[in-house]
Image (cartoon, rainbow, N blue to C red):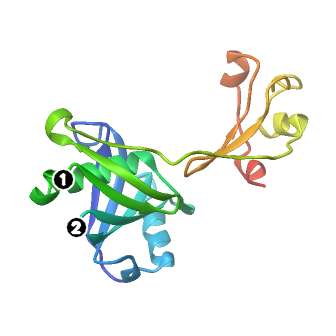
C-alpha cells in the first residue's frame, strides 16, 4: 500500500484525546487514492478514530472531502468536518484570514465559516437531512432490539433519516425500555 500522512484530531476539545476523535489525510487530489485504499485505512484505524476524512484542495478557497468509517463510506460527518477544517485553518496562515471556505462532500457543497480568531471555532451548515420512507413491523423491531411487545411506541412514526449517516429513529415508550435495549446489529442491518 502507498504511504500517506495521517493526522488525528479531536473535535469539540481543547486537550488531546478528550473530544470526538477523527483523522484525516491531506491529498494533492482525491484521485491519488482509491476507494479501496480509503476503506482499508479507515478499517485499520478502527478504535483509534471514528472516521477518516480524505481532503484535497480544489482551489484557494475550495476543498473536496470524503469520509470513511471502519465499515463504509459515509456521505457526511459533522465532527470530522469541524475538526479537519479547524486544524486546516489553524495551520495555514493564508486560510486563517479567509472568512468562508467551500467543501464538496457526497451530500453536496457546504460552507465553512471561519471564526477561529473571534470564537476559536469553525461553523458549518449541515446538509438537509433526507427522510426515507420505510415500512417496519414494530413487533419485528422489538424482537431485534430485545424489547418486549408494546415497548416501541406505535403512536409515533419509526423513521430513517440520513444527514450523512443513515440513522434509524425508534420511538420507545419509557426510559426503562430504552435502558434495556440490546440491539441485534446484524439483524437491524437487513
96 left or right, relative to 24? left
Taking the view exactly as shown, the residue that stands out farthest to the left is 93
Percent coordinates x, y for residue 34 in the rendering: 46, 80
In the picture of the structure, the residue carrying the numbered disc 2 is 60
Mark 1 surroundings: few (<14), some (14-19) or many (≥20) residues within 10 A: some
Occupied quadrant, residue 7: bottom left
Occupied quadrant, residue 14: top left
Percent coordinates x, y for residue 72 in the rendering: 56, 63
Residue at 45% across, 72% down: 38
Percent coordinates x, y for residue 10 in the rendering: 30, 45
- Which is nearer the eye, 93 or 19? 93
Residue at 79% across, 26% down: 156
Image disc number at residue 98: 1
Cβ–Cβ under 8 Å for marks 2 and 1: yes
Q: Upstream in the sequence, badge 2 or badge 1? A: 2
At numbered mark 2, what does the secondary structure look like: helix, strand or loop?
loop
75 left or right, relative to 180? left
Occupied quadrant, residue 20: top left
Amino acid at each position: 500500500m502507498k504511504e500517506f500522512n495521517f493526522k488525528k484530531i479531536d473535535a469539540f476539545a481543547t486537550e488531546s484525546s478528550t473530544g470526538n476523535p477523527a483523522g484525516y489525510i491531506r491529498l494533492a487530489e482525491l484521485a491519488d487514492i482509491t476507494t479501496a485504499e480509503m476503506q482499508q485505512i479507515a478499517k485499520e484505524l478502527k478504535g483509534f478514530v471514528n472516521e477518516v476524512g480524505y481532503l484535497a484542495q480544489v482551489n484557494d478557497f475550495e476543498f473536496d472531502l470524503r469520509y470513511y468509517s471502519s465499515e463504509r463510506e459515509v456521505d457526511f460527518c459533522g465532527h470530522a468536518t469541524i475538526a479537519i477544517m479547524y486544524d486546516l485553518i489553524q495551520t495555514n496562515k493564508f486560510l486563517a484570514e479567509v472568512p468562508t471556505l467551500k467543501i464538496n462532500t457526497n451530500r453536496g457543497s457546504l460552507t465553512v465559516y471561519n471564526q477561529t480568531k473571534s470564537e476559536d471555532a469553525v461553523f458549518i451548515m449541515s446538509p438537509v437531512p433526507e427522510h426515507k420512507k420505510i415500512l417496519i413491523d414494530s413487533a419485528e423491531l422489538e424482537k431485534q432490539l430485545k424489547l418486549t411487545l408494546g415497548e416501541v411506541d406505535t403512536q409515533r412514526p419509526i423513521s430513517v433519516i440520513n444527514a450523512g449517516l443513515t440513522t434509524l429513529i425508534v420511538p420507545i415508550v419509557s426510559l426503562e425500555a430504552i435502558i434495556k435495549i440490546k440491539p441485534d446489529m446484524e439483524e437491524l442491518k437487513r
